[in-house]
Amino acid sequence: MDDAKKMLLIQLFLSSAVALGWTFFIPYTLSVGFSVLDILLYALVIWVSPFIVLSIKKTIDARKAMSIGLFARMLAFVLAISFLFKEQIFLISLMFGVMIIYFWLSINTLYEKITTKSNRAFRNSLFLFVWPFTRTILPAVGGILASLYGYPSLFVIGTLLVLPTVFIAQTVKKTCNMHISLPKHLNKHIVPLTFIEGVWNGTIWITIGIITLTFITEPKHFGTFFSYLGLMGAASSILLGVFSDKIKRRLRFAFTIVAFSSLFTILSSLSHTFYLWTVATGFLFFFSNMTTPFLWTVITETTSKTFNAMLNREIGLALGRMFGTLIAIISYLLGDLHLSLMIAGFIFITYPLAFVLLRIHLI
């Protein structure tokens, strides 16, 4: 099995664990006594934690870093099985920080090294397709299991699904040394662009589940709804996989899907019935699933230094997601979490303008 297939297998196990188990983290934590504000603070700590990890300077083999990151993700599942004290939720946040830097930074860096400019968009879409694919089925399955056996059972299964990935990562042949630390100088092109992207997807990541619970609360219904969102994402992934490398004007296409993603984020903020919420978020997931691989390709083509690009990308995303979560917290305290989606949508629509103002040229 070549490295690309091994990385896809890791993604398959990991995405299955997340789709089956972590989809239900918000309703689960609310059911055991946490508040919405607690969950928003948990998200905020997630995006602060990568900077804690980066503050500990370290040079590490990318293959080893992948295993450490995946082990941290497995610990997050273990910690979620049973909450012994309230602060445990923030330990989970810290595990995310380790994973973001050690796993995502290493696997994205290595995956870029085994792709070429001509096949990058297609292989990136394939790399990312496994997430919406598993999300078409497993949230619905998770909802049924949660109804029968309780939410903790999902996190036990999630732990068992992540466990093999720790060892698969060690068999990847392609590797490199990564110097993990906060860079002295941030990339003036990548960080602003990924900050804007991070504000948008960070807001969506934490608010969609919370708002959905205002319409449906049963685990089976909640899981079915997220399987529907996964289906919309999978449909766009299939289209992207077919046409991605045939699209000549990638920037124009990327900016178009950014515009549609922004539009449906704003429309989601205006959806106060379950029918409108279902339609708006469905199209939001359809277009947002196209957005990620193309913006990823845009970022990697701003520089030939792969690791530097990935590090600055993670920093920009974390800063943006931190800001997006703060917007969600303020909106919630003002009494309208929908407001955060509207703000995020209007911020994201500035992405093409930022690209022009920064005078970015792709290599």
Image (tube, rainbow, N blue to C red):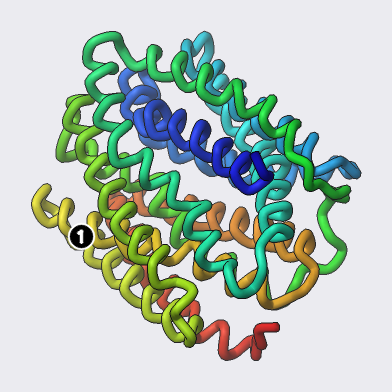
Side of 32 where 228 appears, left or right: left
What SS does tag 1 mark? helix
Quadrant of the frame with the N terminus: top right
Mark 1, other Cα within 10 Å: few <14 / some 14–19 / many ≥20 = many
Is residue 161 depicted above or below 289 in this figure? Answer: above
Quadrant of the frame with the C terminus: bottom right
Identify the image quadrant of residue 316.
bottom right
Q: Can residue 150 be seen in this view?
A: yes
Which residue is depicted at the point 36% across and 18% down? 33
Identify the image quadrant of residue 299.
bottom right
Front position in the image: 305 or 164 = 164
Is residue 339 depicted above or below 118 in this figure? Answer: above
Q: Can residue 49 be seen in this view?
A: no
Side of 58 where 307 appears, left or right: left
Identify the residue at the far front of this view.
Answer: 1
Which residue is depicted at the point 72% across and 31% down? 67
Q: Where residue 187 sits: x, y (%)?
A: 75, 72
Name the residue that disc number 1 marks.
280
Q: Where residue 198 sits: x, y (%)?
A: 53, 60
Going by the numbered disc 1, the residue's amino acid type is: Ala
Is residue 91 depicted above or below 182 in this figure? Answer: above
